Amino acid sequence: MSDGKPLNESKMEEDRPDTPEPAEVQEPAQEEIELVKMEDVITIDPEATDVDLNHGRIGKIENLEPLVKLERLYLRWNLIKKIENLEHQTTLQELELYDNQITKLENLDNLVNLEVLDVSFNRIHKIENLDRLVKLCKLYLCSNKISVIENIGHLSNLTMLELGDNKLRKIQHLESLTNLTQLYLGKNKITKIENLDQLVNLECLSLQNNRIVKIENLDKLVNLTELYLSENGIERIENLDHNKQLDTLDLAKNRISMIENVGHFECLEEFWMNDNSVSDWSCVNALASNKKLATVYLERNPIASDSTYRNKLKLAVPWLTKIDATLCR
């Protein structure tokens, strides 16, 4: 089951601000893998609502017809190449196919009650064939080979969309998804923040590890509480005047030399700006207006080489409880 924190995307671990890279996994040769049939690992119970077949070495979806009350089907970490034989599972609300060998979204038309679909870590090139899944609330497509956001405009009930670690170059075709509260687009090739004006209910936006050089076009996202922009080429903190509800701002691993334009963030609790170019101690005083600020990461900035770095930071912002993953005394 997905925990709502897609890989490389959602809120980072409390004691580590840097997004970990996914480990390289060596796939065994197909001839070395002994495929398992579903009938060998599943006990058919017509009353079952949940079936967990994770880590089963299953090669094919089949023989599920008797499960007429099935609501949740978990098939993570298997060897499935094709979505098929699900036409009788019309009661299905949640389908997890995370980490398989699927190359195409298909044969989902009858799953009209599906609310959660997870096909992350597969080999999918295109978003397609989701026309009838109008009840979808959460769609996970992380770590595939998708190059264009398309064919999801009709999914008006979506609240969470995960497209991190794909081949996207542009934010587009999201205008009708006005119920989105979480959007994850990290680890792509996106060069500009754009086409988000209609997503007025967005609370969490992740654009980590892209090719963005400027913070812009976020004025309409007044309900944003979490903004993740680490590992880009951003040089200034700017154009966030209307995002007053931010409690987490991640700008780590950019090219920022000044802390500025942050005083209006009355709710800010987490400020991550490690691995930048801040060398002027005076700009740290800009954080003195953020009375709820609890955690600051500024390690690997020029100012962090100062032997009294922690003391100076604590003097500037006395209410800090954590500096660079270490609790303040």
Image (cartoon, rainbow, N blue to C red):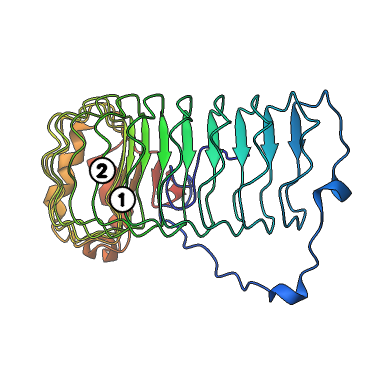
Which quadrant would the N terminus be assigned to in this image? top right
Asked whether 107 or 301 is in front, the reply is: 107
Residue 4 placement, left or right of 78: left
- Against 160, residue 179 (above or below) is above
Q: Give SS at disc 1.
A: helix
Alpha carbon of mark 2 to alpha carbon of mark 1: how far?
A: 6 Å
Q: Residue at x 35, y 40 (%)?
A: 151
Residue 318 at x, y percent in the picture: 30, 37
Residue 228 placement, left or right of 164: left
Residue 25 placement, left or right of 49: left
Mark 1 neighbour class, 10 Å CA radius: few under 14, some 14 to 19, many 20 or more: few
Q: Give SS at disc 2.
A: helix
Asked whether 72 or 103 is in front, the reply is: 103
- Against 311, residue 265 (above or below) is above
Quadrant hosting residue 147? bottom left
Tell me, for residue 315, which label it has, or none.
Answer: 2
Tell me, for residue 245, which label it has, or none.
Answer: none
Q: Residue at x 81, y 67 (%)?
A: 34
Quadrant hosting residue 220? top left
Q: Residue at x 53, y 34 (%)?
A: 109
Q: Amino acid at mark 2?
A: Leu
Asked whether 185 or 302 is in front, the reply is: 185
Instruction: Determine whether label 2 and label 1 are within 8 Å by CB.
Output: yes
Residue 205 at x, y percent in the picture: 32, 39
Residue picked out by circle 1: 311
Q: Residue at x 64, y 46 (%)?
A: 84
Residue 212 at x, y percent in the picture: 20, 56
